[in-house]
Image (spheres, rainbow, N blue to C red):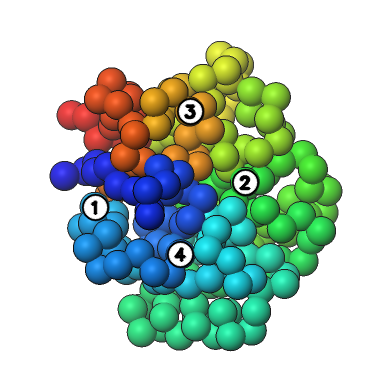
Amino acid sequence: MHIERLDFENSPYLGVYGVATDRVVLVREGLGEKKLNVLREVLKVPVVETSVMKSRIVGIFSAGNSNAILVPWYVWDAELEHIKNSFRENGVDTEIVPFKSTLTALGNLILANDRAALVSSKFTREEAKEIGDILGVEVERGMIADYHAVGSAGVVTNKGGLVHPEATDEELEWLRDLFGVDIYVGTANMGVPFVGSCMLANSNGVVVGHLTTGPEIVKIEEALGFLD
């Protein structure tokens, strides 16, 4: 299966608690082996349990792609060491990079795949350039549907993307050109427009919040390139 429903301790907001790339998933601690196995089976990459700044909202504090994952500068040294060691043990060729900025909700403010990154215009131009350099991709500053939280308002992989239903046709065209994939609008978890908060997705599959409806799942599968 390319898509599965899941909850994290009854929460349907999976994207709040993790970040997925084509090489690894970082996810909050304490999920239990059954749910970790669903993540492994669907996303087909190693899953690393961690906290960030002693918090379980790992998806709020981290963002990235296959090349690198950014975490706040204030990440604890022990957490950084744990993540680096776990990457080494699993053969994950991805950097984990503490990023110096007053903005710490990186997962809310950065949307990236392996071709490009869209970052909130709350980042300075210098910060945006640095993010692009770390991730090894083209970067642009902007918003989606008038929201700065571009990482919450969208999910993008190397196969497709889904964004807030209020995104304009012009924004969709711009995002398609930027990320090099088809981008659709849609919702998850029974109408939630902030789709990035509702799922963990990479080129292999997607795990969505357990409240996501059948029609939403069909749209998600289409948007992320899983419908033949």
- Disc 2 packing (10 Å; few <14; some 14–19; many ≥20): many
The secondary element bearing badge 4 is classed as: strand
Residue sitting at x 37%, y 48%? 10
Q: Nearer the viewer, mark 1 or mark 4?
A: 4
Sequence order check, earlier mark of 3 and 1: 1
User: What residue is shown with label 3?
Assistant: 192
User: What residue is shown with label 1?
Assistant: 42
Residue 115: image tag:
none
The secondary element bearing badge 3 is classed as: loop
Tell me the distance, in whole angstroms, between the alpha carbons under discs 1 and 2.
Answer: 23 Å
- Disc 1 packing (10 Å; few <14; some 14–19; many ≥20): some
Badge 3 vs badge 1, beta-carbon distance below 8 Å = no
In the image, residue 105 sits, relative to residue 185, either above or below, namely: below
- Disc 3 packing (10 Å; few <14; some 14–19; many ≥20): some
Residue sitting at x 51%, y 50%? 16
User: What residue is shown with label 4?
Assistant: 28
Q: Position of residue 152 (x, y in %)?
A: 57, 40
Task: Identify residue type, mark 3.
Answer: Val
User: What residue is shown with label 2?
Assistant: 108
For the image shown, how many numbered marks are present on the structure?
4
Residue sitting at x 36%, y 41%? 209
Q: Nearer the viewer, mark 2 or mark 3?
A: 3
